[in-house]
Image (cartoon, rainbow, N blue to C red):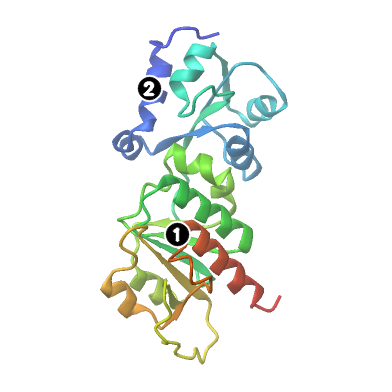
Amino acid sequence: MIESTRNSRVVQAARLHRARYRRETGKTLLEGPNVLEGALSSGVVPETVFALQRDELTRRADQAGTDVVLVSQAVLDKLAGTENPRGPVAVATIPQQGAIEAVDTVILCGIQDPGNVGTLVRSAAAFGFQVVATAETADIWAPKVLRSAAGTHFATNIVTGATVKDVAAAGVFLVALVAAEDGRAEPDEEDRPIGLMVGNEARGLSANQKAAARATLTVPMSETVESLNAAVAGSIAMFAIAQGRPA
């Protein structure tokens, strides 16, 4: 058992809470049973799992080839990003990024809040959407985002650092999610998959991003409410689009 928070393995793992260190190593932290379960079920084998005790989940990780290490509560507190964590916390390599596919897609255009990013990833996985994040969006593989998405990162295709034009070039029909309908709705003669563009929480979509859209979509709501949270609006829109598609 590792009991010291100064243990070299613990110190190295804790550094993965920093974006720079994640970029340098290509690794991240998977915190909690849901995230670890999602990774293992998708064939991802973490490098190390730090846990308070052995259970069925850690046994699965061990059988998959992961180094399972028992730690004290103090060590788990240092590794986790939440208060009173129950673990486990795993170190895993960030999956290699694939290409943008010609499927229904949610495009995160500068979404900054980790909770919103994670919620949109989770909704995308639930409704069969691919996720594309622009360079201005918060790190989609950050531990906070992974926790918010509850392990669903591994259930959908995720592409980062792309632009809305990259998505359009893949054969996807761009639709801008806006607070107030502007009446644009070009027909898609080829019935292509939809690329739902969700803008920054405070600023929304940029002028260039709106101009790239072929149509706009608005979530109808009471006049007493000015707008919805970006993740809520995006999730509702994805559900509506998924329901409108034939099986």
Residue sitting at x 55%, y 62%: 235
Indicate which disc, 1 or 2, sits on the residue closer to the N terminus. Answer: 2
Query: If the image is split into quadrants, where does the N terminus sit?
Result: top right
Kindly identify the amino acid type of the residue bearing the numbered disc 1. Ala
Secondary structure at badge 1 equals helix
Q: Is residue 181 visible?
A: yes
**Relative height, residue 176 to residue 147 (above, below):** below
Residue 8 vs 163, above or below: the answer is above
How busy is the neighbourhood of tag 2: few (under 14 within 10 Å), some, or many (20 plus)? few
Residue 85: image x %, image y %?
Answer: 55, 24
Closer to us: 134 or 95: 134
Residue at point 50%, 63% (across, down): 234
Q: Quadrant of the C terminus?
A: bottom right
Q: Which residue is mark 2?
A: 12
One can see residue 171 in this view: no
Q: Residue sitting at 58 percent across and 38 percent down?
A: 35
